[in-house]
Image (cartoon, grey):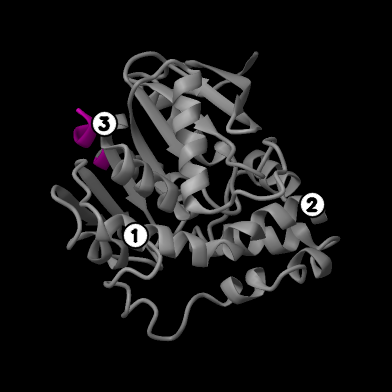
Amino acid sequence: MPFSSLPGSAGQAPAVELHRVAVNGIDLNVATAGTGPALLLVHGFPHTWRLWTGVLGDLAERHRVIAPDLRGLGASTHAADGYDAETLAEDLLTLLDAFGEKSASVIAIDAGTPPAFLMAMRSPERVHRLVLMESLLGTLPGAEEFLAGGPPWWFGFHQVPGLAETVLPGNEAAYIDWFLDSGTLGQGIGTETRDAFVSAYTGAEALRCAFAYYRAMPATARQIREAVENGRLSVPTLAVGAQPVGRALERQLRPVADDLTGHVIEDCGHIIPLHRPEALLRLVRPFFA
């Protein structure tokens, strides 16, 4: 169904449509725009497909953009399980099938990075080019400097079964705002997008699904380790860092990737597509061209 229009860099306003798509035993809420080679956009926490609003219009001038709410997040099914990277990768591959796309380029950030990586490792014929941003890939070597002081504090909080979704209801807006502010170096994001994120992560059930990603990290780390033990990343890949991850992801990828380019966006927070959308577009336009 038609949803809204998002301006492109040259003033175009490609129509954005929302779809309800059955994949892998659940329903995904999916935004699409534009025509051309498929481009799959994979968000993280605490985001929905609206993470991409600052770049979607430009990308849709050259691509058929497909931007789902991940399993359990946004308006997608609050699934009981399946939050490991392998299952999420299967969700994304099945989503491409549903849209009749044999392959796609992929941009992924944060919690979307591990499933996008596994897509490319296990089904390289389905991934044309791969952009991975601001995340770590399980326990692969290369992130030691980033983790020298321990993992981010919220990892442990989110991983305790039943805790965070019990104590946070009623305070979701303040909690989500902390991530949005720190992820833009204090700049914050637009009110409409901020309100959409807060709404998406309000309530114990929505929070449970979000934190299930963190509770699945041991399984995800095992799946990533097995993938690199049995193969290499052959898909041309661009690793993009900002604050705080920097080059840690690039260092993890370097030993396992055949064709890797790394770049750090200066003066940019974790939420790259909303904080520095033009800087991101300057990197991905030539990479996809």
Residue 192 vs residue 141: left or right?
Answer: right
259 in relation to 249, above or below: above
Q: Name the element at disc 2.
A: helix
Q: Main secondary structure of the magenta part?
A: helix
User: What segment is highlighted magenta in the picture?
Assistant: 283-289
Is residue 268 in view from this perspective?
Answer: no
Alpha-carbon span between mark 1 and mark 3: 19 Å
Q: Residue at x 39, y 79 (%)?
A: 147
Residue wearing tag 1: 226
Spot occupied by residue 272 in the image (x, y as percentages of width and height): 42, 50
- Quadrant holding the N terminus: top right
Q: Quadrant of residue 157?
A: bottom right
Q: Residue at x 32, y 19 (%)?
A: 37
Q: Amino acid at mark 2?
A: Glu
Q: In this view of the protein, which residue sits in the foreground, 160 or 227?
A: 227
Q: Amino acid at mark 3?
A: Glu
Q: In this view of the protein, which residue sits in the foreground, 262 or 140?
A: 140
Residue 125's mark? 3
- Quadrant holding the C terminus: top left
Alpha-carbon span between mark 2 and mark 3: 36 Å
